[in-house]
């Protein structure tokens, strides 16, 4: 197995999962991951492969966001229309779908740094790799993650309380 194949096999899955969570669109995530690996092949040597891949992927997403804002808006409208057409047969499935939607909204409400740090950690990146990808000091990542987790919980609870039919009190 050559180095390019090893790099792809080792990191493709985690990079696509991360990008899918970040972008909310698996096809787009696959495109960004593919371009990331193409750029990796052009490099002579990567000192920290995983951090380099995530850094490049983040930069590509930022670049794509500038060019594809209209495309994302259309996809969001299509998703909303599709979601309105789907009828859930079980109340439990509906509750689960609502909780998932609330969680996604809570994640999206975080600052970009907090959101990216949480998503990278979820994909198994260590503090040093997250720090390198986000251009932060490695010593600040623990605090960044703790603060991001707290903010995520606060956002989720606030969104949950704001839902129609919410009593405003936690269930006992």
Image (cartoon, rainbow, N blue to C red):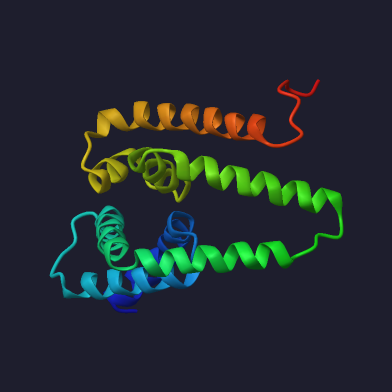
Give the x, y percent position of residue 37.
Answer: 29, 72
On the picture, is 34 further left or further right than 153? left
Give the x, y percent position of residue 75.
Answer: 50, 68
Q: Which residue occupies 27% across, 62% down?
A: 66
User: Which of the 4 image quadrants contains residue 131?
Assistant: top left
Above or below, comparing residue 32 to residue 126 in the picture: below
User: Which of the 4 image quadrants contains residue 162?
Assistant: top right
Q: Which residue occupies 49% across, 60% down?
A: 24
On the picture, is 31 further left or further right than 106? left
Is 164 or 93 nearer to us in this picture? 164
Q: Which residue occupies 52% across, 63% down?
A: 76
Residue lying at the far right in this picture: please name it.
Answer: 90
Residue lying at the far left in this picture: please name it.
Answer: 44
Is 55 or 71 nearer to us in this picture? 71
Numbered marks: total: 0
Above or below, comparing residue 48 to residue 127 in the picture: below
Which image quadrant: the C terminus?
top right
Is 56 or 90 nearer to us in this picture? 90
Which image quadrant: the N terminus?
bottom left
């Amino acid at each position: 197995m050559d180095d390019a194949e090893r790099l792809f096999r080792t990191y493709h899955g985690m990079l696509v999962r991360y990008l899918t969570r970040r972008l909310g669109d698996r096809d787009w995530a696959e495109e960004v991951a593919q371009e990331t690996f193409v750029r990796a092949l052009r490099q002579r040597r990567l000192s920290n492969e995983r951090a380099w891949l995530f850094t490049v992927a983040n930069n590509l997403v930022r670049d794509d966001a500038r060019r594809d804002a209209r495309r994302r808006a259309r996809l969001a409208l299509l998703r909303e229309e599709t979601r309105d057409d789907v009828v859930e047969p079980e109340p439990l499935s509906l509750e689960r779908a609502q909780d998932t939607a609330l969680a996604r909204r809570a994640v999206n409400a975080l600052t970009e740094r907090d959101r990216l740090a949480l998503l990278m950690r979820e994909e198994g990146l260590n503090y040093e790799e997250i720090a390198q990808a986000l251009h932060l000091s490695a010593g600040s990542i623990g605090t960044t993650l703790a603060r991001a987790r707290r903010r995520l919980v606060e956002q989720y609870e606030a969104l949950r309380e704001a839902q129609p039919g919410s009593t405003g009190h936690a269930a006992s």
